[in-house]
Amino acid sequence: MRYEAKCTRCQRSTSNLLEYRCSCGSPLKVNVESTFSKEAIKKDEYTLWRYRKFFPYIEENQIVSLGEGWTPLIKFAKNVYFKLDFLNPTGSFKDRGSTMLISAVHKLIREMGGCIAEDSSGNAGASVAAYAARAGLKARIYVPATVSGQKFNQIMFYGAQVERVEGGRSKVAAEAQKPQQGKFYIGHIWHPIFSDGIRTLTYEIFEQLDWTVPNLIYLPVSAGTLLLGVIYGFENLADSGIIKEFPRIVACQTKQVSPLYHKFKGLPYTPPEKIDSIADALISTDPPLLDLMVEKLRKINGEVEIVDENEIYAAFIELARNGFFVEPSSAVVYAAYRKHVEGGKVDEDETAVIVLTGFGLKSKLKPQD
Ligand SMILES: Cc1ncc(COP(=O)(O)O)c(C=O)c1O
């Protein structure tokens, strides 16, 4: 089936797999043309590729996989489930987007003798670098000059070419996007296939809960690819006539980096001069997908919650002391859930799914004596 993506503003459509943004400057969204049906699932495939039929624009023999998806959904307490997405091959949920994106473009780019370009010093950079390595594709990852840490090491070990850029995060993105012979920018924030791959997370939650929709889903939000992808999944289930109601999706941010929270509530937002949150993966102070997130979240009656550094640290420790070692950026969702329980915003009989997105070994935190 032909690939088609549509502009989220001007409605122009494109079938060009390498177009990451509409010519009008707005984000694109993949047109999901396939109807979801339980019968079409490949039940003996224990990766996210069990949902291959709902991604018909990917040719089967082009799939680049490291065994991603179909991560455990486990019961933590009565009506509380953890989705262990940090157990993906590179240690974060980003592999859902990377497997889809690299599968879609690697043949085309290799045939042109090109290399891919991505901007991220974190989980997305590591994930894209890994899938490029698996596909035998050259990857150039643009990172801030000051970068260090576990995620950066991971990018290096996967063998990507690293370009250090002086200046802020937007300077890094601009450098990655600069046209250059043989370079193809497929940045995960912009390229619509990355978010589209996140639809698989929705399908898994729905299937693992025995085809029921939970009352609540807690997601960490920075650039918004996770939030939008999960919403796209539920939209597809609704359009397919499989579900009647959406869950209450709670987008969770840190107090320091909370542009969605503020815009959603109609409040002005001024980011701090220096971000020093322990949730170091949630740093998009001016995400390009912000308007789209607000629009989609309002449409499905979603919510936004923010938590402070003490709440994040307490949640991180509580998770670890229960055996769940996730990075602080993932603990943000558990902190928000705890806040909702304590504030009486969640009923005891409501089912909540808390998505744990990144592995604890990626964190720079050291244990306190
Ligand atoms: C561990 C982790 N959780 C959540 C997020 C937020 O995802 P998004 O940027 O799609 O909002 C990120 C993004 O880097 C991340 O690394």
Image (cartoon, rainbow, N blue to C red):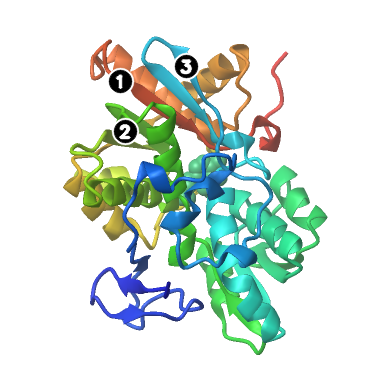
Q: Give x and y (percent) for residue 158.
A: 78, 56
Which residue is at a point 38% across and 63% down the rendered structure image? Answer: 288
10 Å neighbourhood of mark 1: few (<14), some, or many (≥20)?
Answer: some
Above or below, comparing residue 242 to residue 23 in the picture: above
- Is the C-beta separation of discs 2 and 3 under 8 Å? no
* Quadrant in which the C terminus appears: top right
- The amino acid at mark 3 is Lys
Above or below, comparing residue 268 to residue 174 in the picture: above
Q: Specify the label residue 340 is tagged with.
A: 1
Nearer to the camera, 207 or 263: 207
Residue 278 visible in the picture: no
For the residues marked 1 and 2, what is the alpha-carbon distance in whole angstroms?
A: 9 Å
What element does badge 3 sit on? strand
Which residue is at a point 71% across and 69% down the rendered structure image? Answer: 139
Residue that badge 2 annotates: 305
Above or below, comparing residue 190 to residue 282 in the picture: below
What element does badge 2 sit on? strand
Viewer-nearest of labels 2 and 3?
3
Q: Give x and y (percent) for residue 276.
A: 55, 40
Q: Is residue 11 left or right of residue 184?
A: left
Q: Counting residues from the N terminus, which is met first, the one under dot 2 or under dot 3? A: 3
Which residue is at a point 65% across and 31% down the rendered structure image? Answer: 360
For the residues marked 1 and 3, what is the alpha-carbon distance in whole angstroms?
A: 19 Å
Label 3 within 8 A of ligand 1 by Cβ: no
- The amino acid at mark 1 is His
- Res. 131 image quadrant: bottom right
Residue that badge 3 annotates: 75
For the residues marked 2 and 3, what is the alpha-carbon distance in whole angstroms?
A: 23 Å
What element does badge 1 sit on? helix
Q: Counting residues from the N terminus, which is met first, the one under dot 1 or under dot 3? A: 3
